[in-house]
């Protein structure tokens, strides 16, 4: 069998959710494109990191120069799917000065008094920044659907509101990269056990996790609906096989890299003449 190349034309195309998408048909342990081993993934991730760092610096400079564009990476996934690990290994590849990371838990009473997108809008990345959401506005259609907290008509309104919101973001200059970190129930069980067996990981465990795990199949159905109803041309969903952590990190990093390449940030033109400033430093520098 020929060795797969990490020089994939489009990782986004490989993982993008289309009209006939079926989440149940995606193998969480698959490596359909790119590296086939942890070693290959680490080598390519290092190269990706260099490119991400350069593009993010350009985007940051563009924002300081008056540009309006930004990137928003949305990470969704059931418990132990690796949202935190992805942030550490992917967002950690770029300068934190240009990052804005937000984590969304159960809404507070104060947040519940507002529209469900209110707290999301407060955490959007400013121009020139890469924003990363650990969970997101999709919590307000996933949990209510699984636990039957709101009527179907209200869920319909929320799906429409999400699509309108993401279209608004795109029109304002924000590129939205949405990733579902897709794991199997077997891998989730292994990771929960590992948390309990390791004293330094027990802080990640909550006894309530088992109650959520019991609804695993219901969450898969909720994700299926959210993916198909909210994967649009301006904000498509990508399903990343995440049973293998090294592959998950590689895939999300590649998706972010492709988004930045497509964005094509540019350094702002200086408001001064560089040659004049060079001459001043060389000839008129008061500290010479």
Image (cartoon, helix red, strand yellow):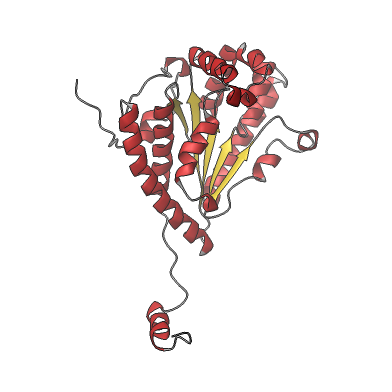
Work out whether residue 198 or residue 137 is closer to the camera in this orientation and state it: 198
Residue 47, position in %: x, y?
33, 43
Residue 215, position in %: x, y?
62, 13
Instruction: Please determine whether, in this image, residue 234 is positioned above or below residue 246.
Output: below
Q: Name the residue: 32% across, 37% down.
A: 43
Work out whether residue 81 or residue 115 is closer to the camera in this orientation and state it: 81
Residue 224, position in %: x, y?
53, 20
- Examine the image and state in which quarter residue 17 appears: top left
Q: Name the residue: 43% across, 57% down.
A: 58
Whether residue 235 is visible:
no
Left or right: where 46 falls relative to 114 = left
Q: Name the residue: 45% across, 52% down.
A: 56
Residue 26, position in %: x, y?
42, 18
Instruction: Please determine whether, in this image, residue 23 is positioned above or below residue 99.
Output: above
- Examine the image and state in which quarter residue 216 appears: top right
Whether residue 4 is visible:
yes
């Amino acid at each position: 069998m020929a060795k797969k190349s990490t020089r994939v034309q489009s990782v986004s195309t490989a993982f993008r959710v289309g009209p006939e998408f079926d989440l149940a048909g995606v193998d969480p342990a698959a490596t359909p494109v790119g590296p086939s081993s942890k070693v290959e993934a680490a080598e390519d991730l290092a190269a990706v990191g260099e490119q991400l760092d350069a593009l993010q610096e350009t985007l940051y400079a563009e924002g300081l120069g008056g540009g309006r564009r930004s990137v928003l990476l949305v990470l969704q996934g059931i418990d132990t799917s690796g949202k935190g690990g992805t942030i550490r290994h992917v967002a950690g590849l770029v300068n934190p000065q240009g990052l804005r990371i937000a984590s969304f838990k159960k809404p507070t009473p104060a947040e519940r008094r507002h529209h469900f997108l209110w707290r999301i809008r407060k955490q959007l990345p400013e121009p020139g920044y890469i924003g990363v959401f650990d969970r997101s506005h999709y919590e307000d259609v996933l949990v209510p659907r699984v636990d039957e907290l709101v009527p179907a008509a209200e869920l319909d309104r929320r799906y429409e509101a999400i699509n309108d919101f993401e279209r608004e973001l795109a029109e304002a200059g924000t590129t939205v990269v949405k990733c579902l970190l897709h794991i199997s129930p077997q891998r989730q069980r292994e990771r929960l056990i590992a948390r309990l067996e390791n004293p330094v990981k027990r802080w990640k465990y909550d006894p309530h996790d088992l109650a959520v795990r019991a609804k695993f199949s219901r969450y898969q159905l909720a994700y299926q609906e959210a993916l198909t109803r909210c994967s649009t041309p301006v904000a498509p969903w990508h399903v990343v096989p995440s049973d293998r952590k090294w592959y998950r990190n590689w895939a999300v990093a590649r998706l972010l890299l492709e988004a930045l390449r497509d964005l094509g940030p540019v350094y702002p033109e200086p408001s001064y003449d560089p040659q004049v400033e060079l001459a001043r430093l060389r000839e008129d520098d008061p500290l010479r």
